[in-house]
Image (tube, grey):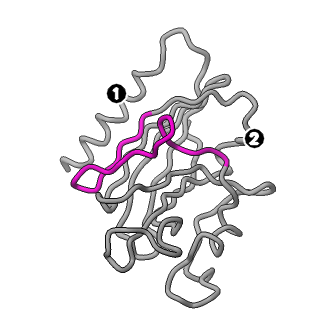
Amino acid sequence: MRKITLGVAALVVMALAIPAGAGKADHFTADLNELNDSGVNGHAVLWQMDDTLRVNMTVNGLDPALGHAQHIHGLDVGSAECPTEALDGNEDGFVDLGEGLPAYGGVKLFLRDGENFPAPNPGGVTTTRVTYATEGLALGELDTRVIVIHGLDINGNGVYEGIEGPLPVACGVIDAQP
């Protein structure tokens, strides 16, 4: 119950952060669910207003020693989806970046502050709160996009090797909210 109450409180605080007098904001959310047995999950709230996109996202279960790329992905035609195990074409037990592309498509926006992706805290949590100018971006309709989190140290040696860095660890469909 405490977790739900904190989540609702965070959403209220984020909603109040929209500037007074601004145009109507389109509101979206994404529940991030684990991929590749990573244990990673999270939640994102997005507001699109005029040529601005605000993203507030918390991701849990990340390896605190490594960086984790975070993106909005999308297909050029149709709606993106989160990949399923059925896309593991080489049957290595992981849906790697390339195998997931037919479901989620290419990167439409890097979710980072400046040049860096948010670093997890010692508990494996990242919190992203950023605003982007979207004019000129080919972002498309947000409710046809997904958020994908990357990076899994499969062998536990503290560095990404081979498919580990770009390996998708969580994904969430972006849904329009009333």
For the record, the magenta segment spans 108-129
What amino acid is labelled 1 in the image?
Val
Dot 2 alpha-carbon crowd within 10 angstroms: few under 14, some 14 to 19, many 20 or more: few
Residue 55's disc is: none
Q: Position of residue 34 (x, y in %)?
A: 43, 67
| Relative to 68, residue 160 above or below | below
* Residue at 29%, 34% in the rendered image: 9
From the top left corner, tell me how far across and down residue 176 is, in percent.
59, 42
Residue at 53% x, 89% y is 92
Residue 123 highlighted magenta (yes or no)? yes
Left/right placement of residue 80 relative to residue 68 reads right
**Which disc number belongs to residue 13?**
1
- Sequence-earlier tag: 1 or 2: 1
Look at mark 2 in the image and give the residue it sits on. Answer: 138
Q: Position of residue 73 (x, y in %)?
A: 63, 54
Q: Residue furthest top?
A: 21
Amino acid type indicated by mark 2: Ala
SS label for mark 1: helix
Residue 75 or residue 178, whichever sits in front: 75
Q: How many marks?
A: 2
As drawn, 35 above or below 92: above
Task: Please give the name of the residue rendered at 69% of the width and 54% of the height, measured from the top-left corner.
Answer: 74
In this orientation, which residue lies closer to the viewer: 172 or 156? 156
Farthest residue, direction right: 77
